[in-house]
Image: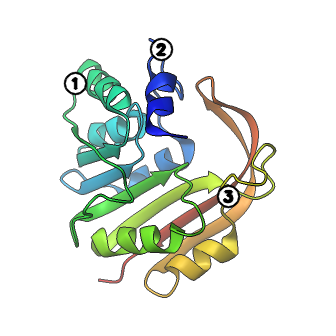
Amino acid sequence: MAEHSWDERFADVNYAYGTQPNNYLRAQASRLRPGMTALSIADGEGRNGVWLAAQGLEVLSVDSSAVGLAKAQSLASVQGVSLSTIQADLLEWRWPPGSFDVIASIYMHFKPEVRPRMHQAIINSLRPGGLVILEAFNQRQPGRGSGSPVYDRDMLQADFADELRVLELTVGMVHLEEGAFHRGAAEVVRFLGQKPE
């Protein structure tokens, strides 16, 4: 989806994907500590970045949509937390090396020709001991056919396992209740990895 299309999707007063965090991200709460630094990529209207900030983390949300990031700041204000934002194309953004204790990639589907490079950028931006928390649609998800990037176990194993310790890598069905655009049964892949100390 082009940047202007994301602006259009986020222009509605309602939050396209809701204001609550992704359930897989929320399930990692016990691994998080106040004062950690976190990066939430393709954070849209901020539901995941704001939740991370509410756990006491210092959060940077990056997204291509200025409209989405403005709503993220509004959500942060309502919830009484601080959130830093950068409007950028992740393909062109200068990822800061060794800067984050947590990187959340929730439904960010990079196209196959750039996916390995972008996942390497994630690895490089982690501090030693840092975590990647990723959820994405897999190839069995209805509507994610030809032309729509999807992920599977083998892709994520190939992209991450040489440099991260794989804590979890699963494929299965979940029930999404994430606003108007993520609702109902979904086939997903979930990955949790940690950079060695």
Where is residue 169, by image quadrant? bottom right
- Kind of residue at disc 2: Asp
Q: Secondary structure at mark 2?
A: loop
* Residue density around tag 3, few if under 14, some if 14–19, many if 20 or more, within 10 Å: many
Distance of mark 2 from mark 1, alpha carbons?
22 Å
Which residue matches tag 1?
80
Q: Earlier in the sequence, mark 3 or mark 1?
A: 1
Q: Is residue 161 left or right of residue 31?
A: right
Distance of mark 3 from mark 1, alpha carbons?
35 Å
- Kind of residue at disc 1: Gly
Q: Which quadrant of the rendered structure holds the N terminus?
A: top right
* Circles 2 and 3 in contact, beta carbons < 8 Å: no
Q: Is residue 76 above or below residue 56?
A: above
Which residue matches tag 2?
12
Q: Is residue 94 above or below residue 128?
A: above
- Kind of residue at disc 3: Val
**Which residue is found at the position 47% from the left and 37% from the top?**
21
Q: How many marks?
A: 3
